[in-house]
Amino acid sequence: MSEIRLEKVSRWYGNVVAVNGVSMTIGPGVTGLLGPNGAGKSTLIHMMGGFLAPSSGTITLDGEPIWQNPGIYRRLGLVPERESAYDFLTGEQFVLSMAKLHKLPDPKAAARQAIDRVEMAYAANRTIGTYSKGMKQRIKMASALVHDPPVLLLDEPFNGMDPRQRLQLMDLITRMADEGRTILFSSHILEEVERLAGHIEVIVAGRHAASGDFRKIRRLMTDRPHIFLVRSSDDRGLAAAVIADGSARSVQLTDKGLRVEAVDFQRFTWLLPQVSRDAGVRLWEVSPADESLESVFSYLVAR
Amino acid sequence: MNATIAMITFRAMLGRRRALLLLALPALLVVLAVVLRWTGNNDLDISANVLQKFGLATLLPLLALIAGTGVIGPEIDDGQIMYVLTKPIPRQVIVLTKLAVAIVLVAAFSVVPTLLAGLLLTGTTAQLVPAFTVGVLVGGVAYSAVFVALAVLSRNAVTIGLLYALVWETLLGSFAPGAKSASIQQWALSVTDALTPASPVSSSVDLGVAIPLLIAVTAGAAFLAAFRLRSLTIASAE
């Protein structure tokens, strides 16, 4: 059972703060590192992988520092986001080389086992340059698994994968977590994290915005006030009815229709059709105005 | 030294189109030697001049630049170095292996062609061939170490290396005698000078100064590269 611990970790580039005072502990099981693009997820993973020194704070794996400590890689596997592996090697040569670099007692067997694990045996004799994105991701995964590390860091592992490859990789990650490994993966897609991770750490604009069980965070996200744009046959009449009903905090008449700030997402979407029917108003359009992930995240940060 | 890293590096260097580039210049030197010999223009003066200006002063720094930066620079740029760095291997082993590969490539693509061209031009006259072969070899070791270190230190290693070899060593060296002494080319020439009685070969640096400088620069560059690789920061994707 291994644990990565971050204490008050910050990282800045010149005047730009990429990661700001993040403290978290990542234990066994799957942890999802969630945040919009540019939030500092990669910077965090690079620091946890020993490729970037924290500007302040400490990062340790089971009490040992990660920065400038190559010995740590006996217990750590890292799958970088960038696609490039050694394109001129075959999948098998690549994984075997990684096994040899780890000085494993039986590199051939370890390589074969890792390749089987990611179900790449059928393409192991082809050069990596001919692989699809999903295949590259899996062979990179095999290379990170070849020494059977207790900790695995995956930077945006699902990027560019098709749905089937996504499912396969999710299966694989779940299986490895069930074996007691500590697995951290980053993603900017809520659904991916929700399906896979029991535990979520949310990063927004370099800050640690939320942490915990995904249901809790999901509720935080859905409980926030939602803005809807509503067009109907009688905007004024509907505005009066919505305000009277109490499911909205504010209603604004604009030339594009009604701008409604709902208190409770589910209650509002459920009540609006009833309210409009009772008021005799026909609904033409109901659309959420701020459903981008960024707005969800910025709401979380503001709390 | 690590055999796996060496294997991957050799395949990366020789598998790409860069291998053709590595071959073009040495081939030109050998062809030139054949033509000069065939036309009878291979007296000691011309031969020494060709070996010095073409072999030692042009072929060697360019090949060492391609090999020295090529063994590690593209890997850092493309991020593949991560696969080597995420292993429990001391950083100096990685650097020394890369350096060894660069030196082998420089030996194959500039020391051997210089030897061939020399034999074609002068045969065994005045010890010119062994003198230049040894000179190019020791120069190649020092250049390789400097260019490997440069590739670890800077993303603009090729440009900086070219500026050093072309502007500093060649251009400034001919104007300012001071700059001439601070040049790997002159130190290598000093070794060659000491090994041959031929009068056209003369260096501005004493052997007693050149050898310690060659050793110091090689060791210093290798140490610096290993030191910087320990804290190599991979450019973030964001």
Image: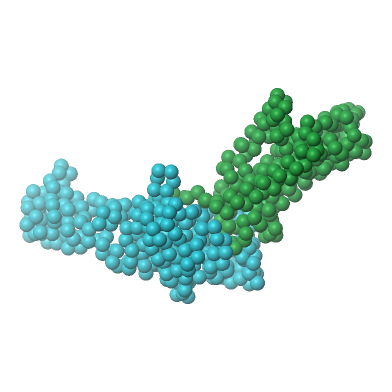
Chain colours: A cyan, B green
Q: Give the left or right position of residue A218, taking residue B200 as reference.
A: left
Compared to residue B43, the image places residue A85 above or below, namely: below
Whether residue A289 is visible to the viewer of this picture, yes or no, is yes
Q: In the picture, which quadrant includes the C terminus of chain A?
A: bottom left
Q: Give the left or right position of residue B20, taking residue A134 as reference.
A: right
Whether residue B42 is visible to the viewer of this picture, yes or no, is no
Residue toward you, A257 or B203 = B203
Question: Which residue sits at x=69%, y=48%?
Answer: B219
Location of residue A25 in the rendering, given as x and y in whole percent from the top left corner: 40, 66
The answer to which image quadrant residue B62 occupies is top right
Location of residue B170 in the rendering, given as x and y in whole percent from the top left corner: 71, 30
Compared to residue A187, the image places residue B29 above or below, namely: above
Q: Give the left or right position of residue A112, taking residue A47 as reference.
A: right
The answer to which image quadrant residue B17 occupies is top right
Residue toward you, A102 or B96 = B96
Location of residue A104 in the rendering, given as x and y in whole percent from the top left corner: 63, 69
Question: Which residue sits at x=22%, y=58%?
Answer: A224
Q: Residue furthest front?
A: B208
Question: Which residue sits at x=52%, y=51%?
Answer: B234
Compared to residue B123, the image places residue A140 above or below, namely: below
Compared to residue A152, the image places residue A11 above or below, namely: above
Residue toward you, B46 or A232 = B46
